[in-house]
């Protein structure tokens, strides 16, 4: 009877261990399947890395430009559009010259 009891106890321990491992595996798979969350984490990581590498003067200028853009959206949009069109013109001109 003692060996039967020991065998049952051993089986219970094995089942408990298997359940814990299965639970851990499910959690790991769920974390890997959460692509949106992983992408957000990676984007935040890249953002922080870029911020760390950017000189303070550049960050200050970018913050100032962002504030100006929020205060005066139309002139900012027009300026941005002109810059994009100008860059596109220069790129196309350079390609056609080759």
Image (cartoon, rainbow, N blue to C red):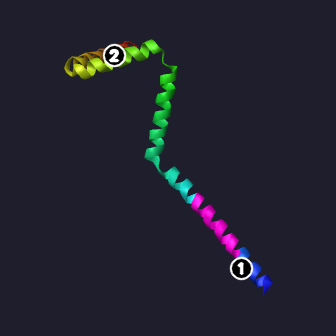
Locate residue 63 relative to residue 53 in the image: left or right. Answer: left
* Nearer-the-camera pick, 81 or 6: 6
Q: Can residue 60 be seen from the camera position used here? A: yes
In the image, is residue 27 above or below residue 42? below
In this view, the residue farthest toward the bottom is 1
Asked if the magenta segment contains residue 34, the reply would be: no
Q: Residues within 10 Å of mark 2 (few under 14, many from 20)?
A: few
State which quadrant residue 3 falls in.
bottom right
Q: Residue placed at 66% from the left, 66% from the top?
A: 17
Q: Residue 18 at what x, y percent from top left?
A: 64, 67
In the image, is residue 28 above or below residue 77? below
Locate residue 42 relative to residue 17 in the image: left or right. Answer: left
| Most common secondary structure along the magenta stretch | helix
Q: Residue 67 at what x, y percent from top left?
A: 30, 20
* Nearer-the-camera pick, 57 or 81: 57
Quadrant of the rendering where the C terminus is positioned: top left
The answer to whether the residues at label 2 and label 1 have Cβ atoms under 8 Å apart is: no
Q: Residue placed at 47% from the left, 50% from the top?
A: 34
Mark 1, residue position: 8
Residue 64 circle label: 2
Q: Which residues are magenta?
A: 11-24
In the image, is residue 76 above or below residue 21? above
Upstream in the sequence, badge 2 or badge 1? 1
In this view, the residue farthest toward the right is 3
Locate residue 97 relative to residue 70 in the image: left or right. Answer: right
């Amino acid at each position: 009877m003692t060996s039967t009891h020991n065998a049952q106890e051993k089986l219970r321990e094995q089942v408990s261990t298997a359940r814990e491992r299965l639970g851990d595996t499910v959690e790991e798979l769920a974390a890997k399947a959460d692509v949106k969350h992983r992408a957000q984490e990676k984007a935040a990581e890249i953002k922080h890395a870029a911020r760390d590498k950017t000189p303070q003067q550049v960050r200050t200028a970018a913050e100032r430009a962002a504030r100006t853009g929020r205060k005066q959206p139309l002139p900012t949009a027009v300026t941005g559009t002109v810059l994009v069109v100008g860059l596109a013109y220069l790129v196309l001109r350079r390609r056609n010259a080759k």
